[in-house]
Image (spheres, coloured by chain):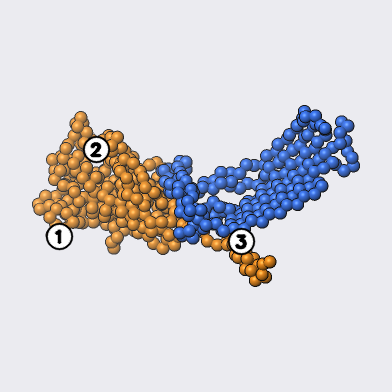
Amino acid sequence: MTAPRDRWLRTMALAVVGLCASTCGSTGGALIKIGLRAGGLSRPAAGPLTFCNAQDAPCTGWTVTLQTARIVLGPLYFNVDPPPGESTRGGVVIMQATEQFVVDPLDPALKDVPGGADGQTGTSHYCEIDLLPLQATSTASAADRQLLGNAATAYVAGSASKGSTTVPFAGLVVVNTSVATPQQPLIALQRVSGALANLTFTEAMQTVELRVDPTHWFDAVDFADLLGSTPVSGTYTWSPDNCAQNSASFDAARCRFQFHLLTDGIKLSVGVYQFSLTP
Amino acid sequence: MDQELLPDPNQGRYSAAPGTTRVGVVGAIRATGRFFDEAASITTVNPRFDDTHSLVPYAPLVVGRSDTALFGPLPGNLRLLDHRLIGEAGLGISYIGKRALPFSQFSDPTLQIDASAYLRAGPVRAGVRVTNLTNNQFPLSQFFYASDFHSRPFATLAPAAHFTAAPPRIVLFTIELDLEREN
């Protein structure tokens, strides 16, 4: 025979189990949707940006004054793991921003990216940033579309000086898709593979912010590579044809200039793309 | 359970999960009579992972089921083709309480009612069976994983919610001929 007190305890335990079964706890984590804002380097005002491409003082490299810059970014995938290789995606993407947007790296004002970002709570360490030509479906101003055309990833214009040499430059940055190989397919060519993004996404976070620092785009660039060409209206420029050996426009120096600007600059995983979260 | 396979939203497949402890209560009743049979049960459980003490996903926290059957000769000594009419009616009620889902989500509780009615006259039996009598629309299964159904301009790689819809109301008519000789 069960004592009344034991029966009472058992009843209460069962009641607690039953109550908890319908009310207590969760499985942890959450699906979240947050805003995404993007802009240029944080500084007091928009306008031309002067810097040393050797990142030192006094400047031992080229002193670059960037007058105009645009870059097409997106989609963005925040990953908990580093990319397993350039030619494949991998890891676990916990947050994504599946829109393409244009950033003016010379304008510090952060602008909302339509669609924002969505995914799950957690901590990312890397962000894969696709560098695709501006798509017809993407939101971009008419001026940006005119500037970038339908093949470019970025546009830069300004001047660089070193000693008595001054190089006015302007041109589009185009990912050369003709050099895609099985080892380095388009997916590898057209993305920043693993920009550092140590971010802890929680339900309390409202916005992820991206700032683009264009000063590192030119870290490995030697503007002397442009001097062998004929300036157009006083400005040195380049084109993807400079890298096509069977092209009349083939120019190894300007091809090298574009390679360093893209591969060792725009696609840098450290320093160029700075992420932060705001509550 | 010290080892278990559970759907992993980040892997997109079942993967080994740490041990779980499930404390619950089952209550069941059965009542039978000359013309009825009733079986009902309710189960409530509190499933937790042993390490984090968070809820185990996909385990319904409360499940209830009732099956009621009525059977016997129809009143009034009704006959058809010189056989006495025998009726059967059934009612099944299923209640599945909210289920813990990944990412702190919960499914809505669902209530589904199934019913059947048959008439038998000698070797002939005819009837109708209806599942989801109220045509209740609800997600039958809910999963979370990364998928890309080209719903956006660019690939979607982060986990999202997916569900399969429960079947709508289904009405099945049956007619049977029993060729076995009656004793």
Q: Residue at x 55, y 57 (%)?
A: B22
SS class, disc 1: loop
Residue named by callout 2? A240
Query: How busy is the neighbourhood of tag 3: few (under 14 within 10 Å), some, or many (20 plus)?
Result: many
Query: Where residue B119 sits in the image (x, y, percent)?
Result: 80, 37
Q: CA distance from mark 2 to mark 3?
A: 69 Å
Q: Tell me the chain of label 3.
A: A
Query: Any idea which chain is the blue one in this picture?
Result: B
Task: Classify A175 as above or below A21.
Answer: above
The C terminus of chain A is located in which quarter?
bottom left
Residue named by callout 1? A57
Query: Where residue B46 sits in the image (x, y, percent)?
Result: 56, 58
When asked about the image quadrant of residue A228, the answer is top left
Disc nearer the start of the sequence (2/3): 3
Find the residue positioned furthest to the front.
Answer: A1
Q: Residue at x 36, y 54 (%)?
A: A124
Query: How busy is the neighbourhood of tag 1: few (under 14 within 10 Å), some, or many (20 plus)?
Result: few
Residue named by callout 3? A18
Query: Where residue A70 sits in the image (x, y, percent)?
Result: 30, 49
SS class, disc 3: helix
- What is the display colour for chain A? orange
